[in-house]
Amino acid sequence: MTEYLIAFNDEWVPDHTVEELRAKSRALRPLVAEMTAAGVLIFTGGLADGPVFSVDASSGTPLFTDGPFLETKEHLGGFAVVDVADEEAARLWAGKIAVACGWPQEVRRFQVPMQLPETS
């Protein structure tokens, strides 16, 4: 099985009232239940508007700053991580999420962790 990130950029989502967002949440519940029953859902969630900070340890010591990097133009809004057989299955679930939400989704495959040889 292969893990995929299905996510949306907050900038892709039009303005909604609180009630419209609640309706979207209710529309997603059966899909989340379907994904869980199918055994493909690892995790799903949305990101809060709360505090955001970045950390840079390039100097050898972690330096924490408020907010994302200045160069950041896109903001992750919400996501699901699925474990599916192949890209076709990832597309299937991403399409279902896009229909339920009513806005675009981006799909990315997780990189397989590199196995380094043991040294003695």
Image: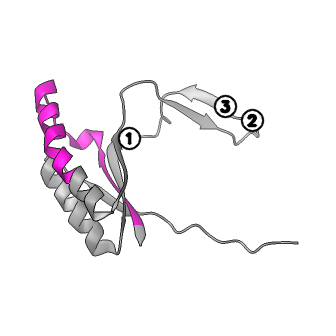
Q: Secondary structure at mark 3?
A: strand
Q: Nearer the viewer, residue 60 or 99?
A: 99
Residues marked 1 and 2 touching at CB (< 8 Å):
no
**Residue type beneath disc 3:** Leu
Q: Earlier in the sequence, mark 1 or mark 2?
A: 2
Q: Describe the colour scheme in one phrase.
A: one colour
Q: Nearer the viewer, residue 21 or 61?
A: 21
**Residue type beneath disc 2:** Thr
Please give the range of residues in magenta.
3-31
> Residue at point 13% right, 53% down?
99
Q: In the drawing, does residue 22 fall left or right of residue 55? A: left
Q: Gap between marks 3 and 2, in whole Å?
A: 6 Å
Is residue 10 covered in magenta? yes
Residue highlighted by disc 2: 61
Q: Secondary structure at mark 2?
A: loop
Residue highlighted by disc 1: 73
Nearer to us of marks 1 and 2 is 2
Residues marked 3 and 2 touching at CB (< 8 Å):
yes
Coordinates of residue 63 in the picture (x, y in percent): 67, 31
Coordinates of residue 34 in the picture (x, y in percent): 21, 57
Q: Is residue 112 above or below residue 105?
A: below
